[in-house]
Image (spheres, coloured by chain):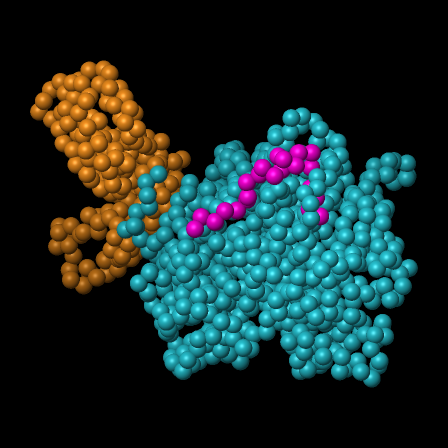
Chain colours: A cyan, B orange
Amino acid sequence: MISPNPEMPPVLRIDNLAVAYKVRGGEVEAVQNVTFEIYRGETHAIVGESGCGKSTVAWAIVNFLGANGYVKRGSIKFQGQELVGRSGEDLRRLRGDQIAMVYQDPMQALNPSMLLGDQMKEVLTVHRGMSDEEAQERCVKMLERVYMPDPANVMQRYPHQISGGQQQRVVIAMALLNNPALLIMDEPTTALDVTVEAAVLDLIAELRRDFDTAIMFITHNLGVVARVANRVGVMYAGEMVERATVEQIYHHPQHPYTQGLMRCVPRLGADKSTSLLYPIRGRVPPPNNRPAGCIYHPRCDYARDRCREERPSLRQLPSGTLVRCHFSEEIDPALWKPSEELELPKAQAEAQDAEPILVVNNLKKYYPVSGSGLKDVLGLGRKRFVKALENVSFAVPKGKTLGVVGESGCGKSTLIKTLIGLEDATEGKAEFLGFDITGEIQQRDLRLIQEMQMVFQNPDSTMNPSYTIGQQIARPMLRFGTVPKDQVRSEVIRLLDAMRLGESYYDRLPRQLSGGEKQRVGIARALASRPDLVLCDEPVSALDVSVQAAILNLLMEVQHTLGTTLIFIAHDLSVVRFFSDYVAVMYLGQIVEIGPAEAIYSPPYHPYTEALLSAVPVPDPSVKVKHIRLEGTVPSAISPPSGCRFHTRCPRRSLLPDPEVCQSEPPWRSFGNQHRIYCHLSPETLSSFDPVMTTGR
Amino acid sequence: MLVKDCMTRHPILIPPSTPAAEAQQIMTESNIRHLPVVGPGKRLLGLVTRQRLALEAGQLSSLSVWEITRYLSRLTAGDIMIRAGEVITISPDRTVERAARTMTENKIGCLPVIEDEIVVGILTEHDLLRAFQAMLGMPSPGVRVIMRMPDRKGEFAKLSRALAANNMGVMGIGVYPTPRLPGFYDMVVKISDATLDEVREALSQVEDQEIVDIREAV
């Protein structure tokens, strides 16, 4: 392959683009002054928090803005041809042939009632008038290209019969069938597990190289950007505030907003005792109410008079970075100090070994599945179970945090549901403060329920939309009688203050709050009964990085002042590393490795932990990560592999003198300091693994 | 090196309905000289070149001043293109030298690359010149030597043994019959990670061969 030709014109050139939506009482400019270009064989990432106009730019390119949206100013040139003002027919031809899009949710891009093969072939038979057999052959080839196992068979299936990662592969294969010059990917991996995400990102990088496709990659995940992009544009409130190569963005961010974003994500190997997360104060202004002057000045720590009056233009610095800031030469991020208004958790004092508050021993949870055969209907068939939890044992000391990680379907949520009593345990022991909690919640003492509360992933679906915030927080207090009736209001306000929400939120309804605020209310409600143990099921996954940092800080503060014990589920391994004292890695209902956080993230590793860590996108392009990709999918929990459940996918199995030993139950290997690994490999072999991540700098 | 390795993928394509004026504008703005005209599914219909946009004097003189404007404004890419049947094309699996030969034989500057009637790329003089640079290790610095050797078997093996003995890597190589000296071949070799003197020292030992030219080159 010859190096790309610099004189070539860009595939896509967007110049001074403004997109407006007509709304009641005027119009809103969702996107303003966006300028960038994408060259052949390049991945240009667009990052920013939700609501900053990333997707609007993508939709403007394919004229998919809806009935009320239109391009107000500027031009979009694709392959030298203006797209703004084109007729629908022209655009359709261009899109089908040369621009393809991949969206976040693959299930929405696939027709659930059509065979995958028919959907794929349609692309070729309709756009190219190809014959059916020829189309079939090409589709199979393309599926092979995206590493789909057994492609001819997959063509004969419906979308729901394959996994999410495979669905996304089908969508990517479909997008590439016409060999497009430009591929727009809008959060293509956000809905996928880290291990699947890593495989899809590898695939994207490879396809870009082989097909010389220009890729516009929209994401909010800074780790993903570091892995795939060549150049990055940072968007804030509808404007592009910085544009540079990926190395420049991560190592020398110029705009205060970019610097702020970098401080919101936990650095590699960082934990809460040695470093802090700094959320960006304030929030993104709504598009109809943007401040005058620099759009970022109300949240900027360096704002001066000039920033309030004059809007900066995108200008080029000597390093090649384009930045929209008056003073970026004078700003040195190394000298940055958190502003006074920012409330940060105090450094955690190293607590002594406390009493375990929760002890779980050989906990099992089986869900019966009913078969559809005649025998099963008559109740004569063999009973089958989904073994969601198998022999789970751990203990959490008081005031500490246990992080639980693993792919989706590994039993993380079942574990939490069983502990809190939404499900009863099938077998085993679980004791909380010395009380048995394996039964259903109806049989539990009210006091016990009060001591154990939960924060959910999606605050929207757990709040009654017609109750005010105050009522919702007051309810557990009244129910458990923790506070005398006449003091409930003041107690709620005290909690709201602690959540940095203030009294004014008491009478608001959930829909008047942003996502981050709703999650704060969710936490306040969980804390209202003054529990000893709070179970958090992905509490920050749905939030933007700056809000995520604020919520994590808040949880740490709560833990620090009240001594609450937390169990914390998250799929973002760097967040878990940062936030947890202990980490349990789960695979298919079993804990495969458990121990102090820092021990989990450095050798010795369980082979599964090793693979999981190597899949994590690290927000630093200079970090070298070992390339381990698991083959196949997670086996069914109805008939899990015998012995070590991971052995069917284990990349380290060949290190064993006798691989057949994996069919039997592995022993727990102990490495001191409560670090245990559930593996047949000898402790010496496990200790000889290299660290997954190494800094190249 | 095959055509698919050095062609430009995703060339700018236009539909036949594009006005000639717009085609001209695209060529000027993007700084290109050839525009493949395609129908649905990127099927090749024709090719617009810069020459095609130049009006023939004979045609002009037959029109009155007023007619010219109207004539020009109605002109589309479909009217002025070289039709698909007359466009010389190439498949992505042919060799670069074959492509170069086709271009010199027909005195043309561009070959649309076609696979199953569909345009998958374009190969121009520019692409071939870049391929030429790549073959001789152009963008990276190193020591460039021209070795003159008699036209017989085993000469290249001698040279490569000398390179191997001195642990020298080759990043570009080209061989051709020595001009005006029958019975000899000249070989251009570009060597990385070695100094001029080291290379001179190593290659002057090769029997029957002569260093014609040696220099540090980028």
Q: Residue A532 occupies which quadrant of the picture?
A: bottom right
Farthest residue to the bottom: give it: A486
Q: Residue B187 occupies which quadrant of the picture?
A: top left
Query: How many tags in the picture?
Result: 0
- Residue at the spot x=70%, y=27% of the render? A660
- Residue at the spot x=81%, y=74% of the render? A477
- Looking at the image, residue B3 sits to the left or right of residue A44; the answer is left
Q: Is residue B147 magenta?
A: no
Q: Nearer the viewer, residue A287 or A285?
A: A285
- Residue at the spot x=27%, y=41% of the render? B140
Quadrant occupied by the N terminus of chain B: top left
Q: Residue A556 occupies which quadrant of the picture?
A: bottom right
Q: Is residue A193 visible?
A: no
- Residue at the spot x=18%, y=52% of the render? B55
Quadrant occupied by the C terminus of chain B: top left
Residue range in magenta is: A674-697
Q: Is residue A676 magenta?
A: yes
- Looking at the image, residue B76 sits to the left or right of residue A420; the answer is left
Q: Nearer the viewer, residue A527 or A581?
A: A581
- Looking at the image, residue A634 sits to the left or right of residue A256; the answer is right
**Residue B73 % position (x, y):** 26, 60
Q: Nearer the viewer, residue A95 or A236?
A: A236
Farthest residue to the top: give it: B153
Residue A479's place in the image compared with A136, above or below, is below
Q: Is residue A643 visible?
A: yes
**Residue A303 % position (x, y):** 44, 77
Residue A137's place in the image compared with A493, above or below, is above
Q: Nearer the viewer, residue A167 or A129?
A: A167
**Residue B159 % position (x, y):** 24, 22
**Residue A536 % position (x, y):** 71, 60
